[in-house]
Amino acid sequence: MADETTPRGTPEMSWFAWGDPARARELDPGLRDLIAQVLRTRLTARPPVPEEAVEPPPSALSERVRAALAAVTGEAHVRTDDAARLRHAGGKSTPDLLRRRAGGADPAPDAVLYPADHDEVQRLLEVCSAERVAVVPFGGGTSVVGGLTPLRGGFGAVVALDLRRLDRLVSLDTASMTAVLGAGVRGPAAEALLAEHGLMLGHLPQSHEYATIGGYAATRSSGQASSGYGRFEDMVVSLRAATPRGTLEAGGVPASAAGPDLRRLLLGSEGTLGVITEVGVRVRPVPREVRDEAWSFPDFATGVDALRLLAQSDTRPTMARILDESETFVGAALGGSQARPGCQAVLGFEGSGAEVAARAAAVGEVLAGAGGTPLGAEPVAHWRENRFSAPYLRDTLLSAGVLAETLETAASWTDLLPLYSAVAGALTGALEGDEGGALVMCHVSHTYPTGASLYFTVAAAAGADPLARWERAKRAASDAIVAHGGTITHHHAVGTDHRPWMAAEIGPLGVEVLRAVKAALDPEGVLNPGKLIP
Amino acid sequence: MADETTPRGTPEMSWFAWGDPARARELDPGLRDLIAQVLRTRLTARPPVPEEAVEPPPSALSERVRAALAAVTGEAHVRTDDAARLRHAGGKSTPDLLRRRAGGADPAPDAVLYPADHDEVQRLLEVCSAERVAVVPFGGGTSVVGGLTPLRGGFGAVVALDLRRLDRLVSLDTASMTAVLGAGVRGPAAEALLAEHGLMLGHLPQSHEYATIGGYAATRSSGQASSGYGRFEDMVVSLRAATPRGTLEAGGVPASAAGPDLRRLLLGSEGTLGVITEVGVRVRPVPREVRDEAWSFPDFATGVDALRLLAQSDTRPTMARILDESETFVGAALGGSQARPGCQAVLGFEGSGAEVAARAAAVGEVLAGAGGTPLGAEPVAHWRENRFSAPYLRDTLLSAGVLAETLETAASWTDLLPLYSAVAGALTGALEGDEGGALVMCHVSHTYPTGASLYFTVAAAAGADPLARWERAKRAASDAIVAHGGTITHHHAVGTDHRPWMAAEIGPLGVEVLRAVKAALDPEGVLNPGKLIP
């Protein structure tokens, strides 16, 4: 048996950075000078503290409890070594990375558990609940909202529950076009397992290379092809979860009126109500035809309105995004080309053949009528090549001494542009000053008939205390979101970082409802304490 | 001010029958003889007991509590007269109607409340919770699962909370294509309010002429155009509900990852968790083009498989239904024509113009390839004319001494035909015998990529005790549904009638979750006791 605590297919992530350590890059000196000029700051390289120099505090797990957990999983699947613990010490937000790069006081879980299947997860939760040990369910480790921070929540110890061994295609029904996947199956593995049958899932968030099926479900993820294939929650047919009170199974029929849809309580529960172990999803045939088109618009407002018309029409692209002026300019510069003035939209069409051309033609008519100019497929090819690479660039920037981070929201079409201005203004207001400047970029990457998402990318002078600087900016942006009709998160989830805004989002009675559900499923409160529920 | 306890636009329903009393019809003698022959029974007319002969027990509401309720709504909007109480004595299932037609021991609420707005609903719930009076929220009165039966649930009195005065278009956002409608707006009124702006909702269940927006939400309704426009729950952008603990508002943004979607707890809550007072919905332009097509298939299995191919394709009709052999035959006979052998499918396409013809052509290619023969638009015109009339026919049959009722379920495509055989067999087995025969018909009226609904219509000899006969058949059908992978209800909801099968549907832990949410929102348990939650 291979060491099953090593992930298959995907290299283990660096502990202080995103992704495959082999893909880390240094910042091109020319680009470095340009950034320094734009941000009005001197850039000082900030390399991470080497892993050998970081020593987490000793595991607080008693030998008795460790043995009880190992009795469930086998000795090899309870790890308390530094390497495993450091790699489960949280997610991949910029604050996470800044703390870790500084070799600082980041918490580490007291152990990492690697159960083999649903039943082992179930029994581990029973042990943890009885022994009052906090449990952080851990999928791909890609949270950017503090969802994986190993908080003890008043308990004596905390363990990370790594689901990577739940990595099977459990079942496939090609007539109903559904598949059940283990929660630990990563994005590329899911597509590879389905591709053997000519099928696909089509869920491609930026975290795709590492994120897991269970994580997609637990965080209400949304992928780059959401215009065509929907959000992940729309693909979910059934869910199986382990809880301290037993197994909860929800869904399984195509539609029902048998009371409230309990799948929707597990979707977005972020490990606080149960540990999702299996997800039944809708699958599709691999498209025979893929067609890309970039378009240019004179300004963001015109481009956003064109995407609104598409989202409200009968004929839609599979993927549709529009970049604001700053992001269009920077995107072109990073791709080594000169940007056209205005804003660039990136569209993709996937389907069964002739209908793709017909759909692209109908969409083209709408876009041309709305003020767009076609740019051909080439700019989309560049985007496709780099669609999962932005987190690597962030590490490059952090090492070069630039503060870089993203945040996102969504609102109705009516609220969207005022929200855009308010959030951009809040970020700029918080970051521009004596310590240097900030470059705030934005794109719309998910459109719906009733509204759209906004995704902001910020690069700023790091200043003396980049973490405090970002926390101030993030607070200002979050307050602006709540004040202008946005949701505190469209697809990053809540974790620790958005939790202070949850009461504003769902109201005090909504908070009580979540607490009541948690008390029913997790009476001791061991599941992911300090996350999601205020 | 007009008497606001009289519904606007729609005539008040007969107390013992569906719909407008002026539309009641007697059974054609020729048809009567044919039915008697098919069901191998003598038909004896069974007229209802006249309303004057029915006297509900005196209202159990104390004068003190009545006055407290009237202090909220005004005296005119708390009614305790027999006419109002009888018309709120339950819904319109065949068991409801059989009990009422017999002048029997049907319960009547102790009063009917007609609040003006959300705040009055909120204050009424506070009074009822404090005074421990059970509350049955009442929309169009169209429940066919016992959802409106005025059960006291251990409390001293029960009131019906009729939402008909919440009948406004509260707001409209034409850029975001959303509208907020009062919960008491009926189906046709919703379409009329939106049509003033060139817009529509497009939700057309068989109950459309009476059912309300709030009822659609509370029961997870599905309409005849669900292939194109989705289930009602898919149209809901936001919800506002009054609960004994205060107001709960959910949704409002096009998409979010801020924890579990709390809209989905109210959708399908059937008045047990709160009283939905306002519903934000997605709206659409009124289609410029409507095109109908009927198709014939050699048998049900071939036709169902053709609809599966459509539901899983990129190009779909707005409406798609297929009738089994029996329903095809009876439908033609009722329409005065000779049916083709085999099964008939009814398709509708709605849209913005040229794309409708293109879509119909693409669909036609799929259907022809799957063994279908086009029959033109005429059979669909007949179906459209009668699409809301079946409940009137049921009253005609009940008066003529025929037992008639419907039930429905949904399952994956793989499970669908075995489920169809099992339920049809259970119904026939329970109804065929010494007392006469049964005619079991079925259609698929809602298709999804992963499965479809089954809607059964049963006509049977009434026998000595038609109510007991139906209850036996319903129990056998429900057991067959649970045993063969179906949901206990696809769009009729749970009420009292499906409650015994809820634990099998959602599991014991699912039941505990619903109880926990109810305890948080309705600690005294006054909201619709005895419904939905086991």
Image (spheres, coloured by chain):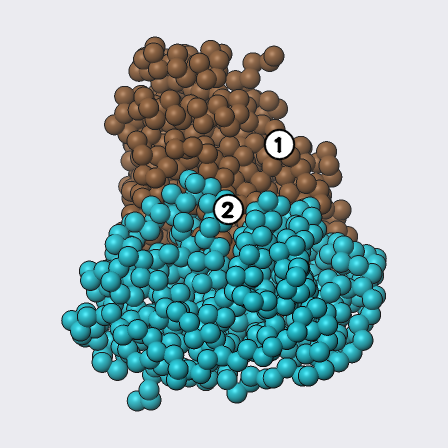
Chain colours: A cyan, B brown
Between residues B125 and A458, which one lies in front from this camera angle? A458
| Residue at 38% from the left image edge and 48% from the top image edge | A514
Please state which amino acid type lies under the numbered disc 1: Val
Q: Quadrant of the C terminus of chain B?
A: top left
| Residue at 50% from the left image edge and 46% from the top image edge | A505
Provide residue B243's location: percent of width, then percent of height: 41, 33
Q: Residues within 10 Å of mark 1 (few under 14, many from 20)?
A: few
Question: Residue furthest toward the bottom?
Answer: A1
- What secondary structure is found at the residue carrying circle 1? strand
Q: Residues within 10 Å of mark 2 (few under 14, many from 20)?
A: many
Provide residue A232's location: percent of width, then percent of height: 51, 63
| Residue at 34% from the left image edge and 11% from the top image edge | B64
Q: Which residue is mark 1?
A: B170
Question: Label 2 marks which chain's residue?
Answer: A
Taking B444 as reference, is B152 left or right? left
Taking A109 as reference, is B23 left or right? right
Q: State the separation of the CA atoms marked 2 and 1.
A: 22 Å
Above/below status of A145 relative to B182: below
